[in-house]
Image (tube, rainbow, N blue to C red):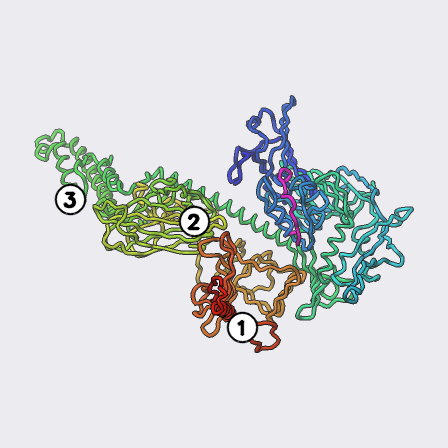
Amino acid sequence: MRPILYNANETAFETYGLGEIDATKAQVTRERNGNYTLYIEYPASGPLAGTFKNDMRIKSDAGLRTKNQTFFISRILKDSTGILKVYAKHISHLTEKMAIRNNTNVSGTAQAALAIWALNALGGIRFDTWSDIDLTSKTSWNIADFKTARDALGGVAGSILDVWGGEYEFDNTVIRLHKQLGRKSPIVLEYGRNILRAEDDQDIDGAYTSVYPYATYTPESQGTGEGGATSQQVTVELPEKYVDGPYIGLYNERRVLIVDFSSNFKDKEVPTIDKLRRLAKEYAINNRLGLPKINTKIEYVDLSKTLDYKLTQILEEAELCDIVPIYYPEIGLTSEDAKLTTIVYDVLLEQNDSVEVGVIGDGFKSSMTSNLSGKIDDLASNQQRLVNTLPDYLLNAQGNKVWYNRPENNEHKIGDIWFEKNGLYDRMYVWNGSQWEKRIDTEDIDKVKKEVDKQISDAKISTNQAIAQANAKAEEALKKAGTLPDTSKLSDQIKQQILSSPDLQNKVTEGVNSVDGNVIYSKIFSKLLTQFANKGDFESLDRVQNDQGRDLLNLSKQITAQTLEFNKLTESNKMYERILGKSETDAPDRLSRLVMSSQIFQTEVGKYSTTGGPNMLRNSRADDGLKYWTEANGRLNFTAHQFYLNGQKRMFSLRPGAFVHSPRFIIKQNTNYMLNLIAFDANTARFKIAFCKRRKGSTNDFDEMQIIFDKTGSPAFNSERAVKKSFSFNTGAFDEGYLLFNYQGNPNGWSGLFMTELDFYEGSSDRLWQPSPDDSAEPIEAVRTQVSQLAGSWSVKNLSSAGDVLNSINLLANGTNLIDGRLTHITGQTVIDNAVIEDGMIANVSANKVTAGTIDAREVNLINLNAKSVTSGTFKGLTFEGGIIRGNYGNTVINLNSNVTTYNGTAKIEFMSPQNSLEFNSGGRKAFLSPTISNGTNYAAFAFGVNDRGVMDPNANFTGLKIFNQYGHRKVVLIGDVHIVKDSVSNNAPSTSLADIFRYINENFKALQRFRDQNGEGYPGFYDISL
């Protein structure tokens, strides 16, 4: 595609914006985990030359499989060459202008780290994130070390890339961090085949030949008390101290790298010499220790765009981070697994210009900042820690091994399964007794999907072209035939055609309401007799008999011809009467359109909406903004939302405290009415709809308020999608009124309600929304059917009132048949020779082999399931039977058999709404623990006790404990006869009532008062402290 220019504030990119950029050169450069830029050369005399401005948006492809990316202009260079140079950066580079919140602490997986990053990024735009790296780690960000949000992504010690590793994919405003982004590409870069020029740069600075491994641990303390032993950290090393890597022979001396493998041992696992040695050897091999760091730039011919490789185009495609073999023996450049670290893509030619490659395992060196060195040891340690959390294989129900890493080179059982990761794709192999046989490759499925999409696209294009041609022919034929679109005038036009017929010498002046052939013939013949001599004149004029005889013969022929033509018109008129009716009022009920000619026959029948009365609410869909609707506090607005028609139509938006008045309208007394509306809401406290009605002549705002709907709690309708609700009621003895909508939201977050398609009408049954008759002069037409027949095509269409096609059948001249509609039902047996189905639902399928990228099913019955991973956003309607549900790292364990839930780390159960409880019901009593809020406030409170009516009510019939902590009201309330047990050592330990204790104290003071009074000693006043 050619790049397209947009304004800086564009976000939808649904149009061609300011236009396509007719550039002379356009290149996108992408670096692994780094820069992502677009460079454009444009003629200074071009129509858009004066339009380019900094920060404008450009849509452009960025690679063979990376399409439709967003860039923003960062620099425009104008000089005397006549060429305008435009430099743009990918939208993800906006993170360089965003800040990260100070002292942000991060822990968990890479997915969690990215989510925390997105939540704490300040400024710019919103970015969505994703990662498949399951390694758990932690880090923290402060504004002293992390100047921008992009620093937290990578390029600085402690960044996500530094701690978790991986490869970034920037897809517009989505940031994904992959374990491995690229795939093992089938393309081969070879001198003499596709390489034009190569430059190989090898650097041994920072290279090592050997690993000096160690691990530390702290043994558990022995003894207790002050005299107990104190634990000290222990360091484990190899007796030989180091392990040599595979490339030590390339160097004259040994270069030793010290690596800490402590993280490769689980908690309480004591490091052993054997495991430490194995880890060191694997580290040296996996990181190609000693191999020089290689940076190779290759300019090559992208054979995927040549005719010779048209059939194998996919095999020649190369993308960023793909792993490819390179053969250029003349300069000693050979590698089986070079990684593409930089790609320059020609946007106009849609091909790669050049690539730069590096060797896998030489460590990651971020190009986000030039001063970040590769931290091979840290990244290897992080990745190895992840590997240690996964077993090499599992056993399935048949006793076969299911491998998740490369299988060991030993004996395998037929049916063993191996899942291999290939960049963004996955492969599944099955051991057939002699070799691993590839059964599934998601890259192949992706290719099939693309091919299916291509076939469907091609079929749609060809079919649409054929339909467009047929429609064009129909339109042309309609024009030639004389279209009669206005059915109310059809009868008049038919009559006018009869009256102005050129074949009739006589003009019939009166209107033709009913046709009588004898009357018309008599009128014509009588007028002809006045124009020619009568029979007596012929007898007296013998000398001109022959001439007049010939004239009479001609006139007789004319009369005969005119009579035949008139009979044809009479039959045509009778046919029109059968179709249209005998009066003009009959026509709209029978036919809305009829066109006939030698080229086209088209009929159209309309069905007009008659269900219920008219909609009494003006502007009921906010098409005219807030016209006719009032809200005194400014809490009513109109907007568009994706929940309703994908944001294409407006909705009324109500904010907390809104009292919305509809226009006032007239109603019938004691009549059933319906109110329909579409709505959704979030964080609602209460929503009420009332009908405020009054009698004729009343000057009150309303005489009675009739509640139609009243709901407390959220949501009032739905928080995930727009739903339709219907309410039926009787008006009573009232004559007019208006609707009142009152919305109240919760104060603990954003709240609001959206509504549209309000329909208030006489009746008792539901219907589709229709506007008020006063909003439009157009007839409210539900659906009409149009049948068109041409010489090479035939079509039937159901059209909406707006002229949109609801469903259609097209039989085209090129042999293509198109059935378009929401549902097509074919009964009986159906045979399809060759089908491409983009989306379908099949009740029963019998198949020898099914290969798919995604299977969505309501119910899947399997004897056994072997899968590399099962990932789901939401499990709904799930019955899970099993023994234990365990978190990835054992922090949470739920034993379903013993009913025990164990939290091994810091745990939290968080309630997000005030209606919460842990309950037990027995004997008509409900024991509960309820974190909630204090009545009339949004302050947290706590209730713990028993209600003797079996309800969760901490106020009435309640015995227990209530805690409040708010301004002026910090209390712990004990309700009931409180008893205290001291030093309980048995099941029946005695208790003392708190009320008795206060009673005893009170009695003691009273006795002391009486004693002092009897002895004349006097006494102070005492308060009664009994409960």
Badge 2: how crowded within 10 Å, few (<14), some, or many (20+)?
many
Look at mark 2 in the image and give the residue it sits on.
Answer: 753
Residue drawn at (53%, 49%) of the image: 456
Q: Nearer the viewer, mark 2 or mark 3?
A: 2
Q: Residues under labels 1 and 2: Cα distance?
A: 55 Å
Q: Position of residue 997 (x, y in %)?
A: 52, 70
85 and 811: which is toward the camera = 85
Q: Residues under labels 3 and 1: Cα distance?
A: 121 Å
> Is residue 807 something that shows in the picture?
no
Which quarter of the figure is the N terminus placed in? top right
Element type where label 1 sits in the image: strand
Q: Amino acid at mark 1?
A: Thr
Numbered marks: total: 3
Q: Is residue 556 above or below residue 392?
A: above
First-in-chain label (3 vs 1): 3
- Give the residues in magenta: 95-111
Q: Amino acid at mark 2?
A: Leu
Element type where label 2 sits in the image: strand
Q: Position of residue 317 (x, y in %)?
A: 67, 45
Give me the disc on residue 518.
3
Q: In the picture provided, is 181 more to the left or to the right than 571?
A: right
Q: Residues under labels 2 and 3: Cα distance?
A: 73 Å
Q: Is residue 26 above or below residue 991?
A: above
Badge 1: how crowded within 10 Å, few (<14), some, or many (20+)?
few
Residue 851 in magenta?
no
Q: Nearer the viewer, mark 1 or mark 2?
A: 1
